Each structure stands twice: as structure tokens, then as C-alpha cells.
Amino acid sequence: MKFLIIFCSVCALFGLNYAAKNPICNQPPGQKGGPDLMCLALVPSWTYYASSNDCRPFFYGGCGGNDNRFNFKEQCEEKCKD
């Protein structure tokens, strides 16, 4: 019985850890800004690719996008990388 309780607790902790990463890390990777002249900034940023479990640099255009955008590689890896 103790084993079952410990096993379920460990599974729950891993589940919480996985769930905490998903909202941002499962969003599409960042892309350079769109055709609008207001979105032509070249802000060095990092984005996470869930398909390859790595963080890659890109230039954020300054408009729109999603939360899968980080200022530093370390932030990206800490938040998303397994």
C-alpha cells in the first residue's frame, strides 16, 4: 500500500512538472515579424521547438506572436527543455 501511495505521488509530481511547461512550450515557434512596417524590428530572441526539444535563435519583429519567445537561451531551456 505504501508503494502505491509513493508511486502515485511521484507520478503526480512529474505530471505537474510536465503540465507547467506545456502552456508556453507547446505554442508554435516564434517567427520574424509580418509584412506590416510597424513589425520590422529585429529583436534577437529565442524560441522553443517541441518537435526537436531545443531552443533556437530568431529575430522577433516586434508585433504579435505568442509567449514562446525568450530573451535568452537559458530562459528558454529552463522553461521548456526536458
Image (cartoon, rainbow, N blue to C red):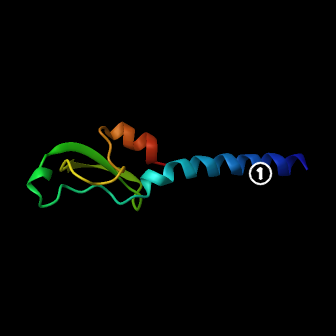
Residue at left 14%, top 46%? 42
Residue at 83% across, 48% down: 5
Relative placement, left or right, of 20 versus 38 is right
Quadrant location of residue 28?
Answer: bottom left
Q: Going 44% across and 58% down the picture, which residue do you hit? A: 26
Q: Position of residue 66 (x, y in %)?
A: 33, 53
Secondary element at image label 1: helix
Q: Position of residue 49 (x, y in %)?
A: 36, 57
The foreground one among 29 and 39 is 39
Q: Badge 1: how crowded within 10 Å, few (<14), some, or many (20+)?
A: few
Left or right: 50, with 38 as reference point: right
Amino acid type at mark 1: Cys
The spot of residue 65 in percent (x, y) is: 28, 54
Q: Nearer the viewer, residue 27 or 57?
A: 27
Tell me which residue sits at (14%, 52%) in the image.
39
- The residue pinned by badge 1 equals 8
Location of residue 58 in the rendering, given as x and y in whole percent from the top left corner: 22, 50
Instruction: Give the total of numbered labels.
Output: 1
Q: Residue furthest right?
A: 1
Left or right: 28 in relation to 31: right
